[in-house]
Image (tube, coloured by chain):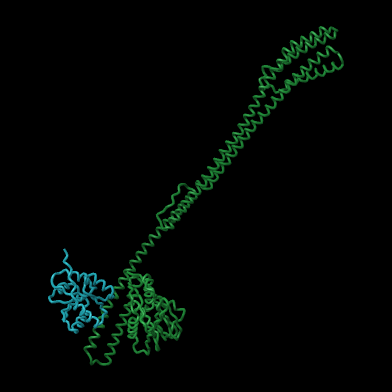
Chain colours: A green, B cyan
Amino acid sequence: MRSVKSKLIAALSLVVLLTLGMAVLLYAGSRTFDADTRRTRQANDDLRELLDFSLVCHAYMDAFGRSLGQRTLIANRDRREAAAEFDARITRVPEMHLAGSGLSALDWQELQRISTRLGEGLHAADAARAQGDFVQAERSFAAARQTVFSQHMLPWFERAIALLRADARTRELEALQSASRLRLTGVVLAFVSSVVASLAVLWISGSLVRPVRALVAGAEAVGRGDLEHRVQLAGQDEFALVSESFNRMTETIAANQASLQLQNEKLERTYRLQGEFLSMVTHELRSPLHSIRGYLEFIEDDEPGLRASSRRYLGAIGESSERLLRLVNDILDFSKLEANQLEVEARRVALAPLLDAALADARALLGARPIELVLEAPPEPIHVDTDDARLRQILTNLLSNAIKFTERGQVTLAVRPAKDAVELLVRDTGIGIPEEQFGLIFQPFRQATSTGAVARGGTGLGLAIVARLAALIGARVSLSSELGRGTEFTVALPRAPSSTKEQWPTS
Amino acid sequence: MANILIIDDDALYANMLEQRLSRAGHDVSSHVGPFGGTVAARRPNLDLIILDVFMPGLDGGALLDLIRQSSGPRPRVILCSSMDAAPLRQLAMQHHADGSIPKSAGRQQLVEYVDRVLSRAAISPRPPRP
């Protein structure tokens, strides 16, 4: 498996190897340079030695010549010193490093032979002088100087010096060359290693950044909801593992979403079927109720002399069927509201007839209870832009609720024009609602309960319908209540026509 | 006094409606169920049909279309249903009925509405289909 770590290690080792190689090459180059320098120095030393030696030879010749003519103590001492010097030099010649130079053809043995011949000549001169034959001594010395020293020894020195000089120059050139080679090697190696190191860093960062970018793009795509997106990463490193699990995650999300959508569609279908069923059933229920009402009217028409008890029974039948009709209507309305199937249409309506109609509805519910229905409205006509049927339904439901929970006293319908709204208030003197149940009572199938209160009949849908209808026509419902004193519901209708129209869903 | 036919699958409601309208002085007959409705509607001298919308097998809208397509006299038609007034009104407009009245309407409301429709000129029949 080629992991990110192994990639890093590979790049690092490449750089390290390159640096080590560079160091080795530079070390070898510097060793060569050192050797060349040393050889150059030796060649120069040899050259100086030879030059010195040739000077010593000249000095020895001069001292020898002088000692022949002057025969003083000083001259003899000079000659002895010069001879010692000469002997010391000639024994050092083989120690010189001449083997590397081209001096094999001109080796020191030849110099030895020449100096032996010179020594023989000088010896002859010395012998002549010892016999008192100074002329012969001079002659022998001159001959030795002429034939051996000038014709052989000096040329040997000249050749040797020339050769050594050439050798020294060659060595020097070699040293210079190896120095410049070293410089060049250093520069080239530095360049190559920096290029390789940069490439390695680029490769590593590329192989780190590319998969991260691909993963980020994938996450963004999935975040946008593109569940078809897959992160494509070649290789087998950690990023490939991450992308694989990322893709698996996306597939799981897509599968979950698909099954959720399927379930959702199923639920919607079930919900719709339920709604249709409910709507059908309630329609079927309503029809016979309308028949009952019609036939009751006929009995009232046709039987004026009916017994009082029968009349009461007929009234009970009528009241029961009306209540049943209201329940069916509530259930139908609520199911439509829940299914968002209820349509509202806004138009400009006068408030007064609408309030009268709602009060008339409420009056039908009062029965024999000692409740006074009161209308508090300002004398000037007020108009609102709303769906009058739905607003009337809201007010009727609130009034019906107030009557249901009030034994005696007053149920008031009041109008209070506010700055940018018209407030309609339904106030009762009933049992009241505990504050912790304010939120509950607008939920379906709930009725507030409190000590002493009994279930009041009804579907428990009235206030739930009020809350949903109010939301539909853009009104706001609030309430305040005091236990045992009464309750007040407030419906705030927006007044500005333009804004109310926008808030309403229109079909 | 007008000649009125009631078509409804609910016999009791049809009978109730028949009673209401005959008590108001009309000459009323009723036909129970959608089938045979077109034949009944072809009776001569018919001024008005009150047609139920929700009937099993053939709903009132389709029956109205059939009645409109058949040749013969062209009585006015009112759609009647237990559905809410607004959608019923829309349905009536869709099928070119002369009016609509919900079943929840009281006696007085019904009689007045029938009189109003009868006093109006009938909606002109649509041209027959090619």
* Horizontal side, residue A164 vs residue A301: left or right: right
Tell me: residue A370, above or below residue A105. below
Name the residue rendered at 24%, 69% in the picture.
B94
In the rendered image, the residue lying farthest to the front is: A380
Name the residue rendered at 29%, 87% in the picture.
A315
The one nearer the camera, A472 or A42, is A472
Counting from the top left corner in percent of width and height, residue A257 is at 40, 60
Counting from the top left corner in percent of width and height, residue A188 is at 57, 36
In the rendered image, the residue lying farthest to the right is: A73
* Horizontal side, residue A143 vs residue B103: left or right: right
Quadrant showing the N terminus of chain B: bottom left
The one nearer the camera, B71 or A387, is A387
Q: In which quarter of the image is residue A142?
A: top right
The answer to whether residue B57 of the structure is visible from this angle is: no
Q: In which quarter of the image is residue A376?
A: bottom left
Quadrant showing the C terminus of chain B: bottom left
The one nearer the camera, A358 or A262, is A358
Q: Quadrant of residue A182?
A: top right
Tell me: residue A241, above or below residue A390. above
The answer to whether residue A473 of the structure is visible from this angle is: yes
- Counting the numbered discs, the total is 0
Counting from the top left corner in percent of width and height, residue A359 is at 34, 84
Counting from the top left corner in percent of width and height, residue A284 is at 27, 76
